[in-house]
Image (spheres, rainbow, N blue to C red):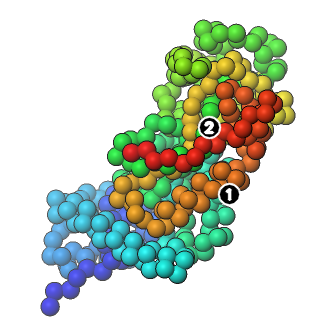
């Protein structure tokens, strides 16, 4: 009698395809490369097809392997969904949850939030990975991407977790030496600290004031792909930065940085983004709902409203209300 492939073998196969490497797949799975090779060999024997072409460096997927990969993803998603639905009947989501985010936001904000999530739901096994680029959530095998920025592909599901703005800021020492710009047209003549954001081109600042949108090309002696470096350079007086309020709020409150051109800002809301195939995933739903509540009540960072810096509760100097918006669906 023909033996059906084991779900564990299918899972190993999908990771190998995503990583295009037996060694990288073994590292992600926490097993040896020999174990990965054995499971792939057994899967090929059970299906009676060649799934992969293996070279000294990379792994290529055969035409049959592509078909098996897409079916394997569906089977594994259905199996995970079954296990989650059973777990939900016990009021406890279970299983692995792969989450991605950007370097600074992931370390400072997402990691503490996920720590609380696991404390409340010990059946979840959360793996957080951070990047300096926009992640292909579905293609790279992530369940959820927690991102800052509003450019989201239409084939993904997005839930807004919080309002956020990027603001222009600089150290008082820099402004004392170089003067304070009064218009956007003056920015190109200043030292601007440029970062490659996940959602914007390098050196191009798209800013808004009320209903007016402007684009400014800036440059400066220092640039990086890490926001924490740019913030430190700004505090050191090296130039003008465009950073999120969650990132520079503590420095603004302490006076180490001051806002420049406070009427201008860049929208960069916080989103939970996941593939459409996980729309009914219980563990993703639990995580997103937890993050919505976390950002609504426990996010101890500053927000913005109309260019005004707010405290952790969302109250500005003029008594503005909370700036965190209700969650929404974006498809």
Tell me if 118 is positioned left or right of 49 in this view.
right
Identify the residue at horizontal 15%, vertical 71% (top origin). 49
SS for dot 1: helix
Q: Toward which corner of the image does residue 112 lie, by quadrant?
A: bottom right
- Please name the residue that numbered disc 2 is placed on: 164
Where is residue 11? Give x, y as percent: 35, 71
Identify the residue at horizontal 59%, vertical 56% (top origin). 291
The answer for how far apart the CA atoms under marks 1 and 2 are is 18 Å
Which callout, 1 or 2, points at the residue further toward the start of the chain? 1
Q: Is residue 245 above or below residue 331?
A: above
Q: Residues within 10 Å of mark 2 (few under 14, many from 20)?
A: many
Q: Toward which corner of the image does residue 67 lie, by quadrant?
A: bottom left
Res. 90 visible in picture? yes
SS for dot 2: loop
Report the residue that reaches farthest toward the right.
Answer: 254
Tell me if 87 is positioned left or right of 33 in this view.
right
Which quadrant does the N terminus fall into? bottom left
């Amino acid at each position: 009698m023909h033996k059906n492939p084991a779900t564990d073998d299918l899972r190993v196969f999908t990771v190998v395809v995503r990583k295009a490497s037996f060694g990288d797949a073994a590292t992600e799975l926490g097993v040896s490369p020999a174990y990965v090779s054995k499971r792939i060999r057994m899967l090929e024997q059970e299906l009676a097809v060649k799934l992969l072409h293996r070279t000294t460096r990379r792994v290529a997927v055969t035409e049959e392997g592509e078909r098996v990969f897409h079916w394997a993803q569906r089977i594994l998603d259905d199996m995970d969904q079954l296990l989650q639905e059973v777990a939900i009947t016990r009021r406890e989501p279970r299983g692995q949850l792969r989450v991605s985010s950007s370097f600074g936001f992931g370390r400072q904000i997402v990691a503490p939030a996920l720590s609380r999530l696991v404390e409340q739901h010990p059946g979840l096994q959360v793996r957080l990975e951070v990047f300096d680029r926009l992640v292909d959530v579905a293609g790279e095998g992530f369940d959820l991407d927690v991102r800052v920025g509003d450019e989201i592909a239409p084939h993904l599901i997005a839930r807004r977790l919080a309002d956020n703005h990027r603001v222009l800021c600089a150290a008082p020492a820099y402004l004392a030496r170089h003067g304070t710009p009064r218009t956007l047209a003056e920015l190109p003549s200043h030292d601007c600290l440029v970062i490659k954001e996940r959602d914007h081109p390098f050196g191009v600042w798209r800013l808004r004031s009320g209903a007016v949108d402007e684009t400014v090309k800036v440059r400066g002696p220092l640039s990086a792909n890490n926001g924490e470096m740019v913030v430190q350079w700004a505090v050191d007086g090296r130039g003008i930065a465009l950073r999120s309020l969650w990132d520079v709020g503590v420095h603004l409150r302490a006076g180490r940085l001051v806002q420049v051109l406070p009427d201008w800002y860049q929208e960069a809301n916080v989103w939970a983004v996941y593939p459409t195939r996980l729309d009914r995933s219980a563990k993703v739903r639990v995580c997103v709902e937890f993050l919505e509540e976390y950002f609504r009540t426990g996010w101890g960072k500053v927000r913005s409203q109309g260019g005004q810096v707010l405290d952790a509760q969302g109250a500005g100097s003029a008594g503005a209300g909370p700036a965190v918006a209700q969650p929404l669906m974006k498809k």
